[in-house]
């Protein structure tokens, strides 16, 4: 980092600063992508070929099944 006279080599310092900035920018982009849960979920859904309507229908079907089981158990008097 120092030249022959003992002074800091400005070109080397600038190069190191630019490399550090680049590394930090990459790390921030990676963290931002990891924190974007909604975006990652949408990307996975698009990749799986499932439409949001189909997923909502599946969730509704599961909710209806759970509600049916709860109602039937209450009518029969609880767990067996």
Image: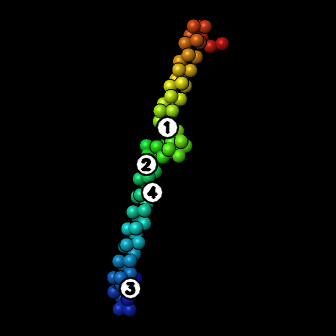
Q: Which residue is mark 4?
A: 30
Whichever of labels 4 and 3 marks the residue nearer the N terminus, that label is 3
Q: Which residue is mark 3?
A: 2
Of 67 and 60, the residue lying toward us: 60
Q: Nearer the viewer, mark 3 or mark 1?
A: 1
Distance from the alpha carbon under mark 3 to that under mark 1 = 60 Å
Whichever of labels 4 and 2 marks the residue nearer the N terminus, that label is 4
Q: Which residue is mark 1?
A: 51
Of 36 and 77, the residue lying toward us: 36
Whichever of labels 1 and 2 marks the residue nearer the N terminus, that label is 2
Residue 1: x, y in percent? 40, 82
Q: Nearer the viewer, mark 2 or mark 3?
A: 2
Distance from the alpha carbon under mark 2 to that under mark 3 = 41 Å
Whichever of labels 4 and 1 marks the residue nearer the N terminus, that label is 4
Residue 56: x, y in percent? 48, 30
Q: Which residue is mark 2?
A: 35
Residue at horizontal 50 percent and vertical 25 percent from the top? 60
Whichever of labels 3 and 1 marks the residue nearer the N terminus, that label is 3
Query: Is 24 situated above or below 9?
Result: above
Mark 4 in CB contact with mark 3 (< 8 angstroms): no
């Amino acid at each position: 980092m120092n030249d022959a006279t003992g002074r800091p080599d400005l070109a080397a310092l600038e190069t190191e600063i630019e490399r550090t900035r680049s590394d930090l920018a990459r790390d921030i982009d990676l963290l931002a992508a990891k924190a974007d849960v909604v975006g990652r979920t949408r990307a996975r859904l698009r990749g799986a070929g499932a439409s949001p309507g189909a997923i909502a229908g599946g969730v509704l079907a599961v909710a209806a099944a759970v509600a049916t089981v709860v109602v039937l158990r209450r009518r029969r008097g609880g767990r067996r």
